[in-house]
Amino acid sequence: MFPLRRAVYSARCILPNVRYMSGQGPLVDLTVDNGGIATLTMQRPPVNSLNLDLLQQMSKALDDVGKNKARAMILTSSSPTVFSAGLDIMEMYKPDMQRVEQFWTTLQEVWIKLFGSKFITAAAINGHSPAGGCLLAMSCEYRAMVNGKYTIGLNETALGMVAPTWFMDTFRNTISDRESEIALTTAKLFTVDEALKVGLIDVTATDKADAVEKCKEFIKKFDRIPPFARATTKLVLREVPLKRLIENRKQDVETFLGFVKDPKTQQAIGMYVESLKKKAGQEK
Amino acid sequence: MFPLRRAVYSARCILPNVRYMSGQGPLVDLTVDNGGIATLTMQRPPVNSLNLDLLQQMSKALDDVGKNKARAMILTSSSPTVFSAGLDIMEMYKPDMQRVEQFWTTLQEVWIKLFGSKFITAAAINGHSPAGGCLLAMSCEYRAMVNGKYTIGLNETALGMVAPTWFMDTFRNTISDRESEIALTTAKLFTVDEALKVGLIDVTATDKADAVEKCKEFIKKFDRIPPFARATTKLVLREVPLKRLIENRKQDVETFLGFVKDPKTQQAIGMYVESLKKKAGQEK
Amino acid sequence: MFPLRRAVYSARCILPNVRYMSGQGPLVDLTVDNGGIATLTMQRPPVNSLNLDLLQQMSKALDDVGKNKARAMILTSSSPTVFSAGLDIMEMYKPDMQRVEQFWTTLQEVWIKLFGSKFITAAAINGHSPAGGCLLAMSCEYRAMVNGKYTIGLNETALGMVAPTWFMDTFRNTISDRESEIALTTAKLFTVDEALKVGLIDVTATDKADAVEKCKEFIKKFDRIPPFARATTKLVLREVPLKRLIENRKQDVETFLGFVKDPKTQQAIGMYVESLKKKAGQEK
C-alpha cells in the first residue's frame, strides 16, 4: 500500500532514529538577541524528525519565548539541508499507546502555540520541508526559504496518510483553496520557485544567514505597530482554524489513534521501515 | 425580463429539444480502458442540454464508474463544439410538477456524486460550457479546455436566474471570492484565455484528443498515491459545500419549485422559447 | 503606545475638526443622472473624516438611492486628494457615551446598507483611502482609483486599534486570506500599483473624471442583466459576512464602547491629538 518507489527521496529524511535521544543533549536551541528576537533552532540530527521528545522541547521553548518577553521568534534548523522531515514515523511503529497519545497531543499543542502565538513568527527554511516540516513553516507568519534543490509541501497522501484537518486549514490559510486541493491530493512537493509563485513561501534567500536576515526584515515591519493590536488582529484572522482544533482535540486524537492501531497501517509502516533500513544498509 | 439580445449566442445552445429522446438511444456513453480510466461522454444532440433523462443516465453512469472499479473518470462531450449548454430550459417550461421535482433532485444527485466522488475526475472541455455545463466541469478535479472560440462560466443572472448556492460554492472552490462575485453578478462567460488566467481551467488543449490526453496526464500524477488517502483528502477539503447541499436538499428543491411555479418565470421562459423558435425558423 | 512618527502622513488627514459642522451645509451630495446612476459625494472638508454627522447623512443618502430607483451608485469624494481619511478620531476622544454609541451604530448601518445594497455600487477613489475610507471602497462592487501618490489599506494596527471583524471580513472578501493577514497585521497602506496587483482595486484612472467613467463602464456590464437576479446573487455571495455583523451588532457595539472607555485608549488618543495640534500649528 505504501508507495515505496516514490519514497526514495524521503529515505534519508525519515531514517529511523533511535528513540529517546534527548539524553544526548537538548533537541532545540533557544536564543534571544538584544532586539527581542528569539531564534528557535531544531537540532535533532539527522533531519529533525518530529518525535515526542523534540515536540516536548519545542512546546516548552514556545512558552519560554513568551516568558522571555521576546516580541518575535524565528524558527530554523541546525541541519545544513533539512528544515524538518516531518513526523517521526517511528513514533507510529509498534507504538506504546500511551506514548503515541502523548505524541499527538504534544503535536497539537505545538501547533496551537505556534499558529496562535501572540509574538511575531517567521520561518527561515534552510532545507527540505515536507509534511510536518511544512506545517511548522506555514504556522509562522512569514517564510524565507533558501534557494536550493529543496522542496516543501504536505505530501501525506504519498505515504498513504490523510493530513489532519488542521494541517489542511493551515495550508488553505496560506494558499488558495484550488491550489491546496491539487497539492494535497497529489502530494505535491513544491520546488522553491514553485512555492514562491503560489505563495507558499514569501521570499527566497541565498543561504541560511540570508533567510534569517529576511525574517528580521519582516519582523522590522512591526517596529512601530503596537504589539497588542498586531497580536489581536492576527488571532482574530486565525480564529476559525484555531477554534476548530481546540474544540475538537479529543476527537482528533481518537482519529489518529484509530489510524495508528489499524493492523493495515502497522503492516504498511513495517514494510516502509524495512525498505528504509535496507536502503540505509546499501548506502554504507 | 429576459435579456433576449444577450441570448443570441445561446440560441443554438438551448434550442428546445423534443422531450424523452432517450428512446433514440443512450444519452451517455461510458467506457473504461485497461488503465482503469473511465470516459463518460455526454451525447444528447445537439448541445447536451441537461434534461431529466440525460441527468438520470449520468447519475447511473457515475454509479457504474465506481462499480467498475475505475480509479478515474474523464467527463467529455460527443458534440464538436459544445461541452454542455447547461440545464434544458424545456424542463422548466409549463412543467409537470412531479417531473420537475425529479429533474432537480436528479441534478442534485449528479452533483453530489461528481463533486464528491472517490474516484479521480477530470473534464475534457471540448466546446462551450455555460451555466450547468460549467458546473459539471468545475465539479471535476481538473479541467483541460480546447483552445477555440468557446466560453465557460456561470451566466445564470443573464437569464434572470440566480445560481443555486451549491453552484456558487463550486465556483468559489475553483477561483477566488473576488473573481467569483464579479463573474457571477455580471454573468461573465470567460474565453479560454481568460478562464486559464483566472484558474477556472487548468490547461488548454489543441483539440478533444489533446484535452483527453492532458486529463490522463493529470490522472497519472496519482499512480503512486494510495487511493484511500487521496479520496479522503479530497472529501475532507470538499466537505463544507458538500454538506451544505446534502443537509439542505429539500429546501433547495422547494426554492427551485417556487421559482419555476412563479407566473413571471413562466412568462419570461415563454417569451424566451418563442424567440428561440423564431430564431431557429430564420436559420432554416 | 501610539506610533506617532508613523502617523506623520496622517497628520493632515485626521486633523481634528470642529464637531457638528453639519450646520455649515450638507456633508454629502447625491445626484442621479438620466441613466439611473446615482453619485454620492462625501464632502466634509478637509478629508472626509467619518464623524456621526457624515455617517448619518450617508446612511440617509443610501436609503434615498433606493427610493430614487437608481440602479447604481458611484461613491466618491469632493476633496482633491483624499477619498476618506476614515473614522473621525474626535468621536472617540473624551466621548459622550450616548453619542459614541450612536456613532458606532450608524457606522454599522452604513456598512450594512452599502455592502448589502441591492443596487450596483462602485467607488471612484480619488485620493488617500486609509482605514474606514478603505472599508467604504471595499464595500462597493468595483474600485477605480486615481493613479497618484495615494494609498489604500486597513492600517488600524498602526494606530493601536484592532479593525472590527466585519472590516476584516470585507477585506478578505476582496483579497486573499494570506494577503489580508500580512496587510492587516503590518498596517500596510498599498500604493496604487500594489493595490492593483493584489486586487484591492480593479483598475487605475488618470483623474477623478476618468475614475467615474470607469465606474460607469463597470455599471454598463449590467445593462442586460435582470436586476433581481444580479442583486440576489450578490447578496447570497455576501451573506456570511453580512449575517455575522447583523447577528452581532450589540456585541460589536459593546466591544467598541469598551475600547473607547478604556483610560489607556483615552490617554493614547490624547497624546495623538496633541501631536496633531502641534503639527498643525507648525504648518501655519
Image: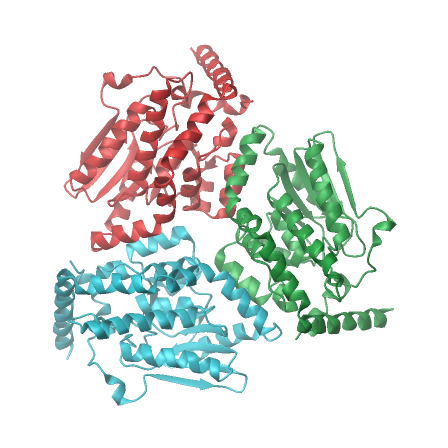
Chain colours: A red, B green, C cyan
Residue C63: x %, y % from top left: 43, 80
| Residue located at (39% from left, 77% from top) | C76
Residue C280: x %, y % from top left: 16, 75
Q: Quadrant of the C terminus of chain B?
A: bottom right
Q: Is residue B3 visible?
A: no
Closer to us: A101 or B84: A101
Query: On the image, which quarter does residue C88 sit in?
Result: bottom left
Q: Is residue A4 above or below residue C144?
A: above
Residue B87: x %, y % from top left: 70, 58
Closer to us: C36 or A265: A265
Query: On the image, which quarter does residue B86 sit in?
Result: bottom right
Query: On the image, which quarter does residue C1 sit in?
Result: bottom left
Q: Quadrant of the N terminus of chain B?
A: bottom right
Residue C200: x %, y % from top left: 42, 62
Q: Is residue A142 visible?
A: yes
**Relative to residue B260, is residue C127 drawn left or right?**
left
| Residue located at (82% from left, 58% from top) | B19
Closer to us: A82 or C178: C178
**Relative to residue B16, is residue C76 drawn left or right?**
left
Q: Is residue C33 above or below residue B196?
A: below
**Relative to residue B133, is residue C245 drawn left or right?**
left
Q: So how many labels did they put on this image?
A: 0
Closer to us: C92 or C179: C92
